[in-house]
Image: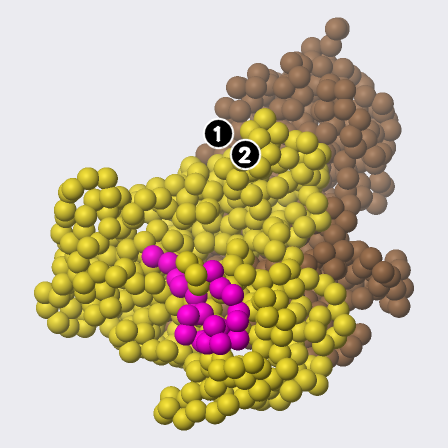
Amino acid sequence: GKNDYDLLVIGGGSGGLACAKEAAQFGRKVAVLDYVEPSPQGTKWGLGGTCVNVGCIPKKLMHQSALLGSALKDAPHYGWNIAQPVHHTWSVMAQAVQNYVKSLNWGHRVQLQDKKVKYFNMKGSFSDPHTICGLTKAGKEIFVTAENIVIATGGRPKYPTHIAGALEYGITSDDLFWLKESPGKTPLVYYSFISHLYEIIVHISLTDASQDVSLECAGFLTGIGLDTTVMMRSIPLRGFDQQMAFLVTEHMESYGTKFLKRCFPTKVEQLESKRLQVTWKNTDLGTEETESFDTVMWAVGRAPDTETLNLEAVGVKTNSETGKIIVDASEATSVPHIYAVGDITEGRPELTPTAIAAGKLLAQRLFGQSSELMDYDNVPTTVFTPLEYGCVGLSEEAAVQCYGSDNIEVYHAYYKPLEFTVAERDATQCYMKMVCLREREQRILGLHFIGPNAGEVIQGFALGIKCGATYPQLMKTIGIHPTCAEEITKLHITKRSGLDATVTGC
Amino acid sequence: QEAAKYEKKVMVLDFVTPTPLGNSWGLGGTCVNVGCIPKKLMHQAALLGQALQDSRKFGWQFTEEVQHNWMTMTESVQNYIGSLNWGYRVALREKKVTYENAYGEFVGPHTVKATNRRGVEKLYTAERFLIATGERPRYLGIPGDKEYCISSDDLFSLPYCPGKTLVVGASYVALECAGFLAGLGLDVTVMVRSILLRGFDQDMANKIGEYMEEHGINFIREFVPIKVEQIEEGTPGRLKVVAKSTTGNQIIEGEYNTVLLAIGRDACTRKIGLDKVGVKINEKTGKIPVNDEEQTNVPYIYAVGDILEDKLELTPVAIQAGRLLAQRLYAGATSKCDYVNVPTTVFTPLEYGVCGYSEETAVEKFGEENIEVYHSHFWPLEWTVPSRDNNKCYAKIICNIQDNERVIGFHVLGPNAGEVTQGFAAAIKCGLTKEQLDSTLGIHPVCAEV
């Protein structure tokens, strides 16, 4: 054809790379443009997108560091003699994580090469409907044409620019994972997690769509021994089941994270000592307070960088409020041959697996004679807070709203993971619930689980729900003993009954 | 407990015949006292040992020398078990189930004799009986076995560190014990007569064995012990084991502090007077055949759990069968225990979760051309930073091509295999097909998304 490429993908993240590689499988000429605009603090990274560089991957690894800290506390109960004190060194962890991420960047480059996908480390924008202008770091411009274009540029953390000092002195998740030094200076961390020298405040606002990332960050920062405070204006984990959200934050509080609820910051100033002074309003008490911290991290939501894409020039419609690209069920934008996948699309979950699946299916529809559309229903997810929360399907509130509380049954249980017993760990927030339709078949609408390895637990059940699993079917499934997941197959106390839902014994 | 809910007059007789070395325990059965519970806790202790090593790579610093104290662990575990024993006593009392710590045996129709520890005998009659006496570890029948060897019945409450241990057997009990003992820092050898994990998918069994070998556990294959002698008394002492090859005349000797026998379990059905009431058992195995309602050949006598012939020896199966039986007898229910697609997990150092057919059994039943096996190695994210094995974790699903590529077998080798497998078992119960599996999104980043 007259175009340079059959498919051009702007954005080398989860969605973009999946789409490009899948298209290449069909023997198509494919190119990917990926470029990372440095954060206000100057942080940047390689190929792979948010997930690989500043999202899921480093997050889970740092979460693992925190979990290992807990393991170090459990170990003596199980007979391991570990001499006190135990220290955590940020730079050792950060370097290990960063090295791994860099190996993934490299891996992606190699994969693209193997699959004969052309890679441009350039910032893409539309020149005309079939032409993309690629800008290198040095300012050189090239023009590339393509028959089909997929926009998969994702999002970046927002800054609350209306707050004085926010941009100058605050960091975001973009920066946190790449810090060479501890956000709390040179750490000397003790088991009891008390260290007033290294304080961090993480602020979450009410519009935060990536709140889970912020609670996750606050969680692991606490776990590695840093004094961490979370400030939030209203509710945590908006959009998630609120009972579960409450249990998650309640656990974090007992774990050592401080919360400043119903507060919002008004300014950030730098003190002579280089520490940051944050001033905020407490809406409950109507007071204004200040405190100083080493680091202020903003987690107030993510937004796509659609301005620099020059979408208006080609007529791709976006949501005026969010800036996200409007797509239909086939990932098509308002311009027929231009598509979008991943975090940049309006109304989609901001998750890696959905971006990957959508990207792959799109490529299959464009070049592989497939007509399969992406199913965004019943997408399972997990929040990797110190006590993890995994879920699939509807929250209890959503189910009530959809079907009416008389038509749903909620089975629930408080349980104690076996491993917590000998370790003398508090299992107060270890809880699960299953929301089902009340009518005869009792189809499962939603499953929620808080506990260790929540992601591992929920994954298989998500599959079951995809198959239309019903409560009776789950009850017929025999449990694996001893695990936490088996408790799901034993759920039998309903909320309606008002009975004590604590699991007792075998 | 279930029967008591329906206002029936229920009695439970529980008695633990001490092990050859004199060990005994409280109410709760094998799982609670000498099975699943202590096993998983000690497995956890071993996993924590590994976590300690990993944690250094994640930035945690502490002294190089980390030692494990067997007594501290065992005491914690035993305390927890004690709380469970107590919990069961309380639960039975609350549910008004009469409990007697006495050895029960049939003496005539509808009549059982209960003998307590002091030898006092009492007779009880009942409308119906449920036999759930489970099993006990088998001994080799060689000189020195009962005098000097221990079994899983003794291991979990051993009042001293077992030291250099020889585990005889290749059952999951053998491999799990060998696994955690090695994880705690002990020198462990496993003596295997023929294959590992008989009855399990052999491809997976071999991977488990390989992993254990690569992580410092010695395997002596195709040998059986013929004699155990004591070199020195002590806690632990020193034992000499003489073994003979199964394929030739070769004889080898080895010295160990402890010899743990894990060669199988025998049903406790020979000395409970079953002949007096005419309950048929399999003479060879001692197991009791029952119909699909857990009824023996004697209409008023039922059986559940490990003693059943051709059924899985698992706690959840026993619990489910027991509960449903009581509901059928006293609550007018009709549900029978579903023994198909029962998931299980072997808690070896690299855990193995499985539900459904092994590859061999699937091939045998459906024919090689009618099944498709999808498989993949994976590298858990948590293993990357500490540079742990990158090609050992593995998952495979076996599909029946003729039935819409229905998933008939699920196998996963990796951390938290039990947690991963449970949900998949539920999905398999719902008739999961490969297509549905493909179209379900993964949670990222977890092992289960593979």
Q: Residue at x 60, y 18 (%)?
A: A117
Write down the residue under mark 2.
Answer: B363
By what rule are the colours in the image chosen?
A: by chain
Q: Could you say which chain is coloured brown in the image?
A: A
Give percent across and percent down for residue B151: 31, 66
Query: Amino acid under label 2?
Result: Val
B27 or A374, which is in the foreground?
Answer: B27
In the picture, which quadrant includes the N terminus of chain B?
Answer: bottom right
Determine contact: label 1, label 2, CB under 8 Å: no
Does B279 lie within the magenta span?
A: yes
Outermost residue to the left? B231
Q: Residue at x 61, y 41 (%)?
A: B408
Q: Main secondary structure of the magenta part?
A: loop
* Residue A245 can be seen in this image: no
Q: Residue at x 76, y 72 (%)?
A: B332
Give the mark toward the camera: 1 or 2.
Answer: 2
Q: Secondary structure at mark 1?
A: helix
Between the residue at mark 1 and the residue at mark 2, the CA separation in whole angstroms equals 41 Å
A54 horizontally vs A161: left or right: left
Confirm whether circles 1 and 2 share one chain.
no
Q: Could you say which chain is coloured yellow in the image?
A: B
- In the picture, the disc for residue A106 is 1
Task: State which chain disc 2 sits on.
Answer: B
Give percent across and percent down for residue A75: 38, 66
B319 or B386, which is in the foreground?
Answer: B319
Q: Determine the image quadrant of residue A447.
A: bottom right
* Residue A490 can be seen in this image: yes
Q: Determine the image quadrant of residue B164.
A: bottom left
Query: Amino acid under label 1?
Result: Trp
Does A280 lie within the magenta span?
A: no
B313 horizontally vs A376: left or right: left
Please report the bounds of the magenta region as a residue range. Answer: B263-282
